[in-house]
Image (cartoon, rainbow, N blue to C red):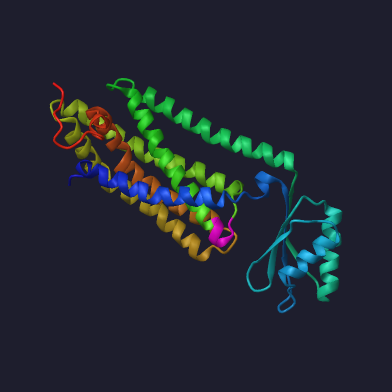
């Protein structure tokens, strides 16, 4: 099985997935939730047939001087309302107005309120957490592979594969945010960091096998050695990730609406992490070893310098 020999096909497939997502990000932006922007989220459950229309709820908010409210239906008799930050007293007044208009009791399923300054701080810390994780991973792999020739390459290749997964998830989130109204909240960050951990773990397994085979097959060409290492770890990598993916798929199908966004991102991220570990990370080492970028823009048939 010649996996490394088809590396540019795999790189191309990665670009085919990442580029549309990045274009969606540029076109539609990143749908940040109140965790990062600040504001309030109120989720209400009405009695069957008593739910207000979204426009009616927006009008109630406007009457109380709370602008920029958006309303999303949840299930048959539920509403999810996002607005600028409100306190408990304002929330109680709004619920009272809604109950008066519907003539029935309303159940508050969720109420979160985050100030703009807190939201900005959370956003900065989230970016810092991802950056710190990337730096820590690179330094750890560099140290762990310090006895191998060019250990820095292993750390940087793992980071590139990790950034591949981050780009996939960011692009997917931009598309789903536009199509389904999903927003980036703290659970998205949790899913992102979890996917980073899975991806790097699988990448290290492949790299470790390359390190072992370098001691055993000293005369084997590097490209052949890397391909042999990937094939040796292929079953383990796929079986391990399939176990996780089946569990996530069951949770996605039967876990309910509240976990749907989180589990979907995890499922896509685990799939991307498995792909990048097998088909991207080790191949980057081969490209680096052969210095293939020196021939990327050379015309066919051009003489090679001695």
Q: Is residue 145 visible?
A: no
Q: Is residue 142 visible?
A: yes
Verify whether residue 236 appears in magenta.
no
At x 68%, y 45%, the residue is 37
At x 21%, y 27%, the residue is 214
Q: Name the one closer to the observer, 193 or 53.
A: 53
At x 19%, y 39%, the residue is 228
Residue occupying the far bottom of the picture: 49
- Residue 117 in percent (x, y) is at 73, 39
- Residue 169 in percent (x, y) is at 47, 48
Q: Name the one closer to the observer, 17 or 43.
A: 17
Image vertical order of residue 38 relative to residue 216, above or below: below
Count of marks overlaid on the render: 0
Left or right of 194 in this view: 15: left
Left or right of 66 in this view: 144: left
> Which of the 4 image quadrants contains residue 80?
bottom right
Left or right of 146 in this view: 191: right
- Residue 49 in percent (x, y) is at 72, 79
- Residue 292 in percent (x, y) is at 24, 32
Image vertical order of residue 298 relative to residue 151, above or below: below
* Residues in magenta, as a range: 177-182
> Which of the 4 image quadrants contains residue 199?
top left
Q: Name the one closer to the observer, 86 or 149.
A: 86
Main SS of residues in magenta: helix
At x 55%, y 58%, the residue is 178
Instruction: Quadrant for the C terminus, please.
Output: top left
Image vertical order of residue 11 relative to residue 54, above or below: above
Image vertical order of residue 48 relative to residue 119, above or below: below
């Amino acid at each position: 099985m010649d996996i490394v020999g088809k590396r540019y096909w795999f790189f191309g497939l990665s670009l085919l997935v990442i580029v549309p997502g990045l274009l969606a990000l540029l076109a539609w932006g990143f749908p940040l939730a109140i965790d990062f922007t600040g504001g309030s989220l109120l989720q209400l459950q009405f009695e069957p047939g008593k739910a207000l229309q979204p426009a009616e709820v927006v009008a109630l908010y406007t009457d109380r001087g709370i602008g920029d409210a958006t309303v999303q239906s949840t299930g048959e008799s539920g509403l999810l309302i996002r607005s600028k930050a409100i306190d408990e007293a304002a929330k109680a007044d709004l619920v009272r107005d809604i109950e008066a208009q519907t003539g029935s009791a309303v159940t508050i399923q969720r109420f979160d309120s985050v100030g703009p300054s807190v939201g900005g701080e959370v956003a900065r810390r989230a970016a810092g957490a991802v950056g710190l994780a990337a730096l820590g991973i690179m330094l750890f792999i560099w140290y762990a592979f310090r006895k191998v020739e060019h250990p820095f390459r292993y750390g940087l290749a793992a980071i590139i594969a990790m950034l591949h997964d981050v780009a996939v998830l960011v692009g997917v989130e931009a598309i789903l945010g536009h199509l389904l109204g999903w927003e980036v909240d703290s659970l998205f960050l949790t899913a992102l960091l979890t996917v980073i951990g899975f991806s790097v773990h699988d990448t290290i397994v492949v790299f470790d096998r390359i390190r072992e085979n370098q001691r055993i097959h000293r005369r084997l060409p590097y490209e052949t050695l890397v391909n042999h290492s990937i094939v040796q770890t292929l079953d383990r990598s796929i079986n391990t990730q399939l176990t996780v993916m089946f569990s996530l798929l069951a949770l996605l199908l039967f876990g309910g609406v509240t976990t749907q966004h989180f589990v979907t991102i995890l499922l896509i991220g685990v799939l991307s992490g498995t792909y990048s570990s097998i088909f991207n990370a080790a191949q980057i080492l081969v490209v680096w070893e052969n210095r293939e970028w020196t021939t990327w823009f050379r015309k066919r048939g051009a003489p090679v310098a001695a």
